[in-house]
Image: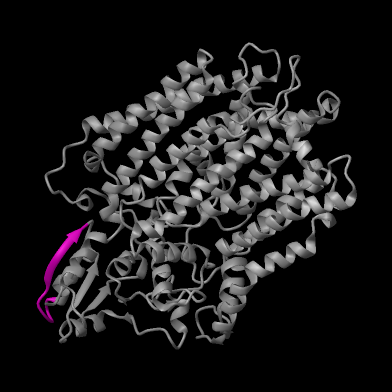
Amino acid sequence: MQPDHLYEEAIVHEPSPQNAAPRRLWSPVSLAIIFSLWLILQIGGLFSPGLLDDVDSIYIEIAREMLQRHDFVTPTIDGIRFFDKPPLMYWMAAGSMHLFGIHDWAARFPLALAVLALLLAVYALGIRLFATTSPIDKPERGGFYAALAVATSIGPYLYTRFYIPDILLALWMTLAVHLFLVTLNRLQSDGTSSSQRQKSTLQPCLAFAAVMAANVLTKGLIGLVFPIGFVLLYLAFTKQLRLVFKLHLIPSTVVFLALAAPWHILAALRTPAIPLPAGFGLPATGGWAWFYLYNEHIARFLSKRIPHDYGQTPVLLFWLYLAIWVLPWTVFLPGAIANHVRTLRNRASNITANTLSVARDHEAALSLLLWSILVMGFFSLSSRQEYYSIPAIPALCLLAGGLLARADQSSRSTRPEATATESALHWHAYLLLPLATIIAILCGYFAITAPRPAPGADLASLLNSNPDFYNLSLGHLFDLTGDAMGIFRGPLIAVSLSMLGVGFGSYLLRRRSFTYAANLVLAAAMTLTLLAAHEGLVRFYPILGSKALAATVNHDIRPGDRVIIDGWLSSGSSILFYTGQQAALVNGRIYGPWYGSFWPDAPPIFGTDEGLRQAWSGSQRIFLLTFNKQRAADLARFAPVHLLASEGGKFILSNR
């Protein structure tokens, strides 16, 4: 047995008067619960609703076009080169659709698998960090609670309802932190020669490099900033910066470059610099390298990206969103953070008491706090959107899970576990219980008082329009009115009832020291809440997507017909995926496809109002997706207008 394995085995031997028998680390029961939650929440929501217009369908349409063109280097959307993001998300969706067919659920499946991987990664890291503070016979309890928190928190669930890369960043960061801690552990192992330590640390260092490459291929240079920043800060705080040179830098760099460099090199070669038009703030010449490496990274960080097609969340609101995304487990963070701050302050005086336990407590405290502050601090200084905090969520869930595992031991203990138990009960009683009660009352009120919508009522007719909020990922929620609440009566009732479990049910169990049952009830109640949120999204879908309208087009379209979107691409991008047709854009040479439109191979898809009118009176049949209620009257002056379908405030018009 290698020395590092001896060290790892030490954490599963509890020094007790009887004997320190080895304890099982991975619990089949815990794994079954985690897997069941994943099946219910992720696989259960895989098949509905359809793809959302904007980024969800844009990323997946890019993957479909990769398959269609057999080009996995240069992403395109609607035939236009698209430079915004690296390719891993596209490759994942394309690979899944290659296996299972061109279906929306097939494209989403890799993201669901990534969530399962994240839950297991958090579980494993939680075992490492909290095995010595979890109940003696349940050393995996801290990891289990942390995985429960990730699975049932609001943010990780909401931001896997559409296809964006941020949950993958959370996975890569979790794996990177764990691999670094394993490497550091092995470097510090006593009783081993220098050559043995170097050999035992090679594998985790190479794995760290591979994870970092995946991170870069997921969302660019930030995949370097967070892992490397964490390593350097951790070593600096522990006064071990000299160990950097023992992290196999050369072979790790080779592995990283072998995985990350080929696509970057090919992308630059296949999209070299071309002359760019004046008057847009662009350089005289530019290609993939200028837009992706400078504009998408440095300029975005400085909030000077061209075009500036995204919102900017205020810093305080950005931090508030993070607290919301981790609900309901946020309520346990004050006690957990206070406990870890005490650990960092008191380590010097406690180091002789129980070296292994104190060292592991210090490792957990420093790594989780650094991880959280690094992510949040970086985005607090740069441009940010409300979901950019997702990579910090596993660290916060681990903080909460560690506190709850410590609280499991005994509420009557005089050891630190008593403080953890009191803290969990205190914050549950004075924050979670009243918050859940207020939500239950509000949801119940709207469910009871909202008018019943008329049969066949279109949700769009019951909403207000608040376009100022649409740069937020959940901005359409501000469109809701009292009249619209009647359509959501079922989900509102479900949330109201589930909040009783989140608040009163789990609190009563926690108060009676049934802490394990309390946490399971909390997770189960939140599962019902999230399922209700999913059902709400399904009912809201006609506003957010165009799948039904695309089905109407597919029913009537013939070779030679044209599909046109009246506006920019993101207003109806899901119609590209569901029809498989290239769409022309009226006044749509903005935002995503704008930069790629300057390339000579860009298809002539951009048109104007006048061009649409001319085409409408031509011999070619047109299917027009529009939000503009006045468009039919305008086009009727040139040729007949037929309304083929309408839903969610959108219309399919045809000239035949």
Q: Quadrant of the N terminus?
A: top right
From what the image shows, is residue 415 above or below residue 399?
above
From what the image shows, is residue 624 above or below residue 234?
below
From what the image shows, is residue 166 above or below residue 504?
below
Count of labels shown? 0
Residue, x 50% and y 57% (percent of image)? 165
Query: At which x and y percent is residue 67?
Result: 41, 72
Residue 302, image quadrant: bottom right
* Residue 92 in magenta stretch: no
Residue 47 is left or right of residue 315, and the answer is left
Q: Residue furthest left?
A: 640
Residue, x 46% and y 37% (percent of image)? 152
Q: Closest to the observer: 182 or 487?
A: 182
Q: Quadrant of the C terminus?
A: bottom left
Residue 80 is left or right of residue 279, and the answer is left
Q: Closest to the observer: 326 or 94?
A: 94
Query: At which x and y percent is residue 126?
Result: 63, 36
Q: Residue furthest front?
A: 1
Residue 200 is left or right of residue 580, and the answer is right
Query: At which x and y percent is residue 446?
Result: 27, 33
In the rendered structure, which segment of residues is drawn in magenta?
636-647
Residue, x 88% and y 53% (percent of image)? 195
Residue, x 16% and y 42% (percent of image)? 453
* Res. 639 visible in picture: yes
Query: At which x and y percent is residue 68?
Result: 38, 75
